[in-house]
Image (cartoon, helix red, strand yellow):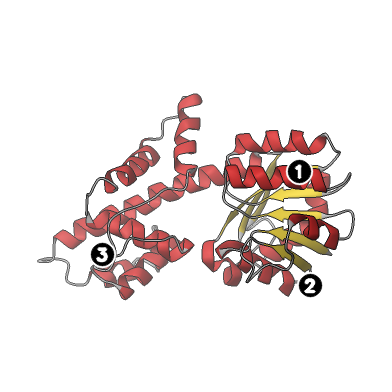
Amino acid sequence: MHIGLVGLGRMGSNMRTRIEKHGIKVTGYDKNPEVTDVSSLNELVAALPAPRIVWVMVPAGEITDSVVSELVDLLEKGDLIIDGGNSRFTEDARHAELASKKSIEFMDAGVSGGIWGLKNGYGLMVGGTDKQVKRAMPIFDALRPEGPRTEGFVHAGPVGAGHYAKMVHNGIEYGIMQAFAEGYELMNKREDLIKDLTGTFKAWQRGTVVRSWLLELLVRALEQDPEFEQIEGYVDDSGEGRWTIEEAIDNAVPMPVISASIFARFVSRQGDESPAMKAVAALRHQFGGHAVKKAD
């Protein structure tokens, strides 16, 4: 198999390496001339054998929209586009319709795993037809964690379902991170009582009901900077939390925890230097390599 990959940033470059380790040839395109294999999308398409598969891994929104539109103009009947970025699920139907006008197929894939995916594998939530999933399954098998296919991979439903599942996944992630961060701040206040804060979180990694990968990453962050003195409590969001809340409102589903977690991020951008938001910023940096503001 030989596929194209558009976007060779933090996620894309690691995904490329993992795919190639499983025997799939990858031709990559990126605007960064230091990492790209070809100089244009036109050259990328020309380099691939038909019927082609092109995985798009670029920032959601206008950039993804531009790449998909250009690919639709360049690709041919029977080719397949997979949007693996964090696009809003409502964009998938529009892109699929655009592609279908030229008999080009389209799938969406929610990808989780951050900068650790190269080593651990990526959690994949995909949307498309059974036939499309079967066609792209060698790629999904290369990317997902080793073990049973049902662990780390799901064909969630038709086009849009993959990104919808990833949206909700990230909303839940916001809530879990906020809970750990608030627990950190409370215990940090009681220095008279809690003498080993990092050790307390570390002890929770085995045997407790809150053990998780996010907890492991919080411990890692604490071991590197126990008081989070090197970063500011400023936390961005990439969109999925907001979209999750919007969907909750549209469907009358109460989401008080996820709503509170996104509003806490908004407060952090107004100069609130709370220890909790420093912990959230540190966690985002640990799993996704997201930029943090360095403390003065």
Residue 32 on image: x %, y %: 61, 65
Is residue 118 something one can see in this rendering?
A: yes
Which amino acid is tagged 2? Answer: Gly
Decide: is 103 above or below 226.
Answer: above
Q: Which mark is residue 68?
A: none
Q: Earlier in the sequence, mark 2 or mark 3?
A: 2
Could you tell me which residue is drawn at 69 percent across and 33 percent down? Answer: 94
Q: Secondary structure at mark 2?
A: loop
x and y percentages locating residue 186 in the rendered image: 20, 56
Using the rendered view, name the quadrant where residue 281 is placed: bottom left
Please identify, in this view, whether the residue under mark 2 or under mark 1 is nearer the observer. Answer: 1
* The quadrant where residue 273 appears: bottom left
Query: Could you give the CA–CA distance between mark 3 and mark 1, rounded to whole angstroms?
Result: 44 Å
Mark 2 touches mark 3? (CB < 8 Å): no
- Report which residue position mark 3 lands on: 295
**Lateral position of residue 98 relative to residue 88, left or right:** right
Q: Residue at x 61, y 38 (%)?
A: 89
Above or below, comparing residue 270 to residue 191 in the picture: above
Q: Amino acid at mark 3?
A: Ala
Specify the quadrant that holds the C terminus. Answer: bottom left
Question: Is tag 3's residue or tag 1's residue first in the polypeptide sequence?
Answer: 1
Marks 3, 1: nearer the viewer: 3
Kindly indicate the quadrant of the structure image that contains residue 92: top right
Mark carried by residue 106: 1
Residue 150 percent location from the top left of the image: 67, 55
- The kind of residue on which mark 1 rests is Phe
Query: What is the secondary structure assignment of the residue under circle 1?
Result: strand
Q: Quadrant of the N terminus?
A: bottom right
Query: What is the spatial separation of the Cα atoms under label 2 and label 1, in whole angstroms?
Result: 24 Å
Horizontally, residue 77 falls left or right of residue 211, namely right
Q: Residue 174, percent across and down?
A: 41, 48
